[in-house]
Image: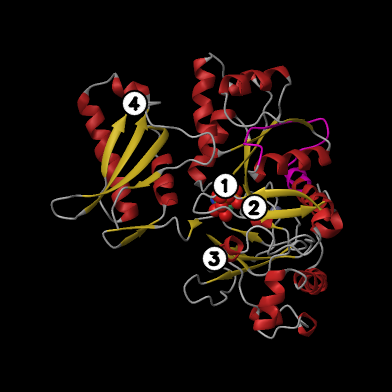
Amino acid sequence: MFWQKEIETLEMKSLRELQLGRLKKTLAQAGKSPFYSRLFQQNRISPEKIKSLEDAKNLPFTTKEDLRKEFPYGFLTVSREEIVRVHSSSGTTGRATAVFHTQGDLNGWANLVARCMYMTGVRRGDVFQNMVGYGLFTGGLGFQYGAERLGALTIPSGSGNSKRQISLMRDFETTVIHIIPSYALHLRKVFDEVGLNPRKDTKLRIAFIGAEPHSEATRQRIEEMYGIQAFNSYGLSEMNGPGVAFECPQKMGMHFWEDDFLVEVIDPRTEEILPDGQEGELVFTTLNREAMPLIRYRSKDLATIFPEPCPCGRTHRRISRIKGRSDDMFILKGVNIFPLQIDTTLMNIPEVGTNYRVILEREKENFQDRMIVQVEVRPEYFQGDLWQLEKLRKQITEALKSELLVTPKVELVEPDTLPKSEGKAVRVLDHREM
Ligand code: ADP
Ligand code: ZN
């Protein structure tokens, strides 16, 4: 059941003591970097004075902007000879940042990913196909080393080349995959194209899906399409990458590893710490990192902590599905909208196919904003009569309207007509001039 039973089931009190000890070490280590030594001086912080986890709540935050300003070495606490790997964020939302690792850091990270995989039931003898981008994206190497640590045969297939992915799955009898959810939906169509059914023609039993926000309805579709168990996997480059939080077989939130990360939830506007159960921005402090410890790093990811003990026996708390980044949210006619709301609504409608996109426009004549939602629908709808298509269009419009409180213009399109991405899906295009 457990990869490291003692640590995974450590009672809360001991877990908090462990965190405090590691936090003190982390602060001392962080003080060796140019950035934190300056920050501590300016704010008159002496790490030795931190006596409880409570004291840590007054430490200043670290932001992505700080990482950008200090690029590349301003956060480094060890000499250049001691670092063996750099990962750079894919820069979805701006200039790149760099995170460095010592060999010790990489070992710790691989162990965390192995712990996550083991938790879902992966064992030696499993064949693991890692269908995400390698290179600077952390999902590739992060899972590679984790799976090897666990002892699974690991196929570093990388992203894309769908037909080859399918033949690798069949040749090596893949049982476990790591795949970006939007790509999993797409790949199912490629199975159809080559006349195969993953439920019958593969040995797949488990998928890890993550790297982008996705709804419960999307997970259920993936499970249904492939006849597998799909587990949500969350991580970010600044906290290594994958292995930060992961679902256990209960699938009721993702356990975050409290022996490795101190996690808080704050109100993104007031920066006030929120109690468990309230939704806010996740803030992380590394507890075991050598080369580049980060203190109270603001992730911009929105989630809720579930404090209730999990039936699986792990004491480490859980977070909800990630609702999106605080900067993913867009405002249309004064209404705040998260892409996840659109995903949930669409994926719950069986007639909807596997891809969609959202375009935001400002009308030239009257400066009114509007949202166009282009939705791929199942092929049979384009063979039926127009009346049926129109009925479906109205149904989707109504469903979106009742969820979002604004009325989108819905366009139905044939399967495979919208652009697809091999990495994280880009589904909202904001063409409004600000
Ligand atoms: P970038 O910031 O350039 O996209 P990362 O690879 O570090 O590069 O991306 C991490 C981000 O991806 C997270 O902060 C989060 O917004 C998103 N993410 C990762 N895993 C999940 C997940 N399971 N659900 C929702 N969002 C996720
Ligand atoms: Zn659990």
Q: What residue type is labelled 3?
A: Glu
Tell me: 89 left or right of 431: right
Q: Which amino acid, mark 1?
A: Ser
Element under label 4? loop
Answer above or below: position of 305 versus 404. below
Asked whether mark 2 and ligand 1 are closer than 8 Å, the reply comes as yes
Which callout, 2 or 3, points at the residue further toward the start of the chain?
A: 2
Residue interval drawn in magenta: 114-135
State yes or no: residue 130 in magenta: yes
Colour basis: secondary structure
Which sits earlier in the primary sequence, circle 3 or circle 1? 1
Q: What is the C-alpha distance between the residues marked 2 and 1?
A: 9 Å
Residue 367 horizontal/vertical position (percent): 18, 55
Q: Residue 237 carries which label?
A: 2
In space, the residues marked 3 and 4 are separated at their CA atoms by 38 Å
| CB within 8 Å, label 2 to label 1 | yes
Q: Nearer the viewer, residue 176 or 250?
A: 176
Q: Which amino acid does label 2 sit on?
A: Ser
Disc 4 target residue = 414
